[in-house]
Image: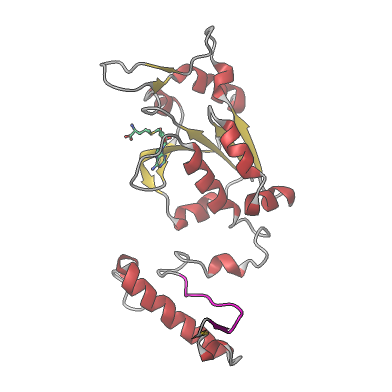
């Protein structure tokens, strides 16, 4: 999979690409992330990418011309166009089900906003889907883009050491993950539940299912709504 990220702060993303699961995905040749600084497409003397909003008001708005020139250079007459995502607090909330869809794509273009956002005409010219990572406002789309890249990278087959890891995660079913324990079996007087030490895999699976369900009921009952029998 290839992900192109358009941003005026590509350095923020470059560091992230060299660590953890994203680095592994890239080293295995399963993920290619290319950053594009659309400031390079600004044509005025100051290489400006933003301007005051028409109608007045605070802040600045990202101009359409550098972004669209960057997209023209990147995509040309590409048909079909890749999936195009604009990180935006006004977008659809990013959920694991969408991440799974994105992980099947061959190519995704991600546009990062800044300031008050992006001139509306960019989204009229290109078929961007707006994606939000939550009901709060950050200063730029770079962190949301990194959230998306990491969520997608760990679902690419062959990236995680054990492909079942992702299947057991929270949100893969209508429930949260179960709690985890590791050595030592006794830590500061707290013992790991006996069932996990007994080696009976059916009992362990049942215990984990029950724990996951109890957690989900306590913390995220909304995930269980409308389901008589959660897995
Ligand atoms: C300061 S925000 C703009 C906020 C915008 N005026 C609003 O209230 O919806 C600047 C940029 O950060 C990114 N951003 C901020 N919060 C985000 C979120 N929760 N999800 C996705 N992107 C976000 C977007 O790319 C946005 O264009």
> Residue 198 occupies which quadrant of the picture?
bottom right
Q: In the drawing, does residue 215 fall left or right of residue 142?
A: left
Q: Residue furthest top?
A: 45
In the picture provided, is 8 more to the left or to the right than 174?
right
Residue under the point 60% across and 81% down: 184
Residue 148 rendering spot, x and y as whole percentages: 51, 47
- Point out residue 162 in the picture as x, y percentages from the top left corner: 65, 68
Q: Can you name the residue that lies furthest to the right here? A: 28
115 shown above or below 202: above
Instruction: Judge by depth and name the residue closer to the eye, 150 or 180.
Output: 180
Q: Between residues 200 and 64, which one lies in front from this camera angle?
A: 200
Indicate the colouring scheme: secondary structure
Q: Is residue 226 left or right of residue 168?
A: left
Give the magenta-colored segment's residue range.
177-187
Please state the horizontal and vertical placement of residue 229, each as a whole percent of the image: 35, 79
- Residue 79 visible in the shown view: no
User: Which secondary structure is most common in the magenta stretch?
Assistant: loop
Q: Position of residue 130 (x, y in %)?
A: 41, 39
Residue 202, can we see it? Answer: yes
Residue located farthest toward the front when viewing the structure as drawn: 188
Query: Of residues 40 and 58, which is closer to you in this image?
Result: 58
Nearer to the camera, 5 or 17: 17
Q: Residue at x 32, y 73 (%)?
A: 218
Q: At x 48% / y 75%, what residue is drawn?
A: 179
Quadrant location of ligand 1? top left
Q: Is residue 180 magenta?
A: yes
Q: Relative to 47, does residue 223 appear above or below in the rendering?
A: below
Quadrant of image for the C terminus = bottom left
Q: Say which residue appears at 29% left-offset and 69% top-offset.
A: 225
- Residue 35 vertical placement versus 176 (above, below): above
Q: Give the side of residue 38 with respect to residue 51, left or right.
A: right
Q: How many marks?
A: 0
């Amino acid at each position: 999979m290839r992900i192109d990220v358009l941003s005026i702060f590509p350095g923020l993303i470059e560091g992230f690409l060299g660590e953890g699961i994203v680095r592994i995905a890239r080293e295995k040749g399963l993920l290619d992330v290319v950053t594009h600084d659309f400031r390079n497409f600004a044509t005025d003397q100051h290489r400006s990418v933003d301007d005051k909003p028409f109608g007045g008001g605070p802040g600045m708005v990202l101009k359409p011309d550098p972004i669209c020139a960057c997209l023209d250079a990147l995509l040309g007459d590409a048909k079909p166009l890749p999936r195009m995502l604009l990180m935006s607090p006004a977008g659809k909330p990013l959920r694991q089900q969408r991440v799974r869809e994105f992980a099947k794509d061959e190519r995704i273009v991600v546009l990062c906003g800044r300031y008050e956002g992006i001139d509306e005409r960019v989204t009229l010219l290109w078929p961007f889907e707006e994606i939000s990572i939550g009901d709060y406002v950050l200063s730029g789309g770079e962190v949301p883009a990194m959230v998306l890249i990491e969520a997608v990278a760990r679902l690419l087959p062959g990236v995680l050491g054990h492909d079942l890891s992702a299947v057991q995660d929270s949100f893969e079913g209508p429930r949260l993950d179960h709690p985890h324990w590791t050595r030592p079996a006794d830590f500061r007087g707290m013992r790991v539940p006996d069932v996990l030490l007994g080696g009976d895999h059916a009992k362990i699976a049942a215990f984990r299912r029950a724990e996951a369900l109890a957690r989900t009921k306590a913390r995220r009952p909304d995930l269980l709504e409308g389901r008589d029998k959660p897995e």
